[in-house]
Image: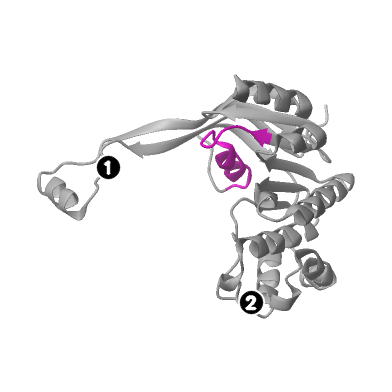
Amino acid sequence: MTRGAVDVSALTVRLRRETNDVRSLRQYVIRRMRGETAARSRFDVIADVSFEVSPGELFAVVGPNGAGKTTLLRVLAGIVPPARGTVSVRGRLAPLIELGAGFDPELTGAENIRLYGSLLGMRAGELEAAHEDIVAFSGVGGSLEVPVRHYSSGMLARLGFAIATSARPDVLLVDEVIAVGDEQFRRCCRERIRELRRRGTCVVLVTHDLDMVASEAQRALHLDAGRCVHLGGGAEVAGAYRQRLSA
């Protein structure tokens, strides 16, 4: 059987939690004087999750806040290591997980195009060829020579999305970035994602937009408290999750 662009098998991610947090400098000093240390425990933020995403597929991840959705993307991006299980991501990866990630706030928009593009593995020739499209798609042409610390969240989202998708990634990770912009930007994002998928890019999308999941996603994963509640077709998972929310 042909393996997908993304393969996740029995993934478990474990984080450390301090159970008696120090809330002030005074508490910290007193506890140090007494020789007390913070009690620590570990908990599973993702537990035994498995799925595969094929080239050209849109795979959606849904669930309530705190379900582990963003942590899952961070694992796929190589930011967070698994405690158990295996994760395989093949080809050029473009993560859009945190707004403005990969940007230097002191650099201009034009400089950040070169910086972020380089971080995504784009060569100088690729960046030069894609520059006009990036500027046109992002709509920040009038602010290209302005440091991005002055950009709004919508401008950062548009610029980051434009650069990441111009890199022609094999795997695109998107965490609600397209929810930041206006309706026109969201439509452009959806069309750009369709275009990438036609070229073979697989997209892993974290979203609360169940209509998009039902209409665009081939398959979807419903996470809750780090565990798989439902894995199946996009419309099937979106419908079941809606029923769960209204119950």
Please tell me which residue lies in front, 22 or 81. Answer: 22
| Residue to which mark 2 is pinned | 108
Q: Is residue 168 left or right of residue 77?
A: right
Could you say which quadrant of the image residue 74 lies in? Answer: top right
x and y, in percent, of residue 100 in the image: 60, 61
Give the position of the C terminus as an image quadrant. top right
The amino acid beneath tag 1 is Asp
Please tell me which residue lies in front, 224 or 198. Answer: 224
* Crowd around label 2: few <14 · some 14–19 · many ≥20 (10 Å): some
* Residue at (76, 56) in percent of width and height: 185
The answer to if 211 sits in the magenta stretch is no
What segment is highlighted magenta in the picture?
61-78
Whichever of callouts 1 and 2 sits on the residue coming sooner in the sequence is 1
Please indicate, yes or no, whether residue 230 appears anywhere in the rendered image.
Answer: yes
Residue 121 vertical position relative to residue 55 in the rendered view, above or below: below
* Residue at (88, 48) in percent of width and height: 199
Could you say which quadrant of the image residue 119 lies in? Answer: bottom right
Q: Are marks 1 and 2 in contact (CB under 8 Å)?
A: no
Q: Secondary structure at mark 2?
A: loop
The answer to if 76 sits in the magenta stretch is yes
Q: How many marks?
A: 2
Mark seen at residue 21: 1
Residue 145 vertical position relative to residue 82 in the rendered view, above or below: below
* Crowd around label 1: few <14 · some 14–19 · many ≥20 (10 Å): few
* Residue at (24, 48) in percent of width and height: 23
Could you say which quadrant of the image residue 129 lies in? Answer: bottom right
The amino acid beneath tag 2 is Thr
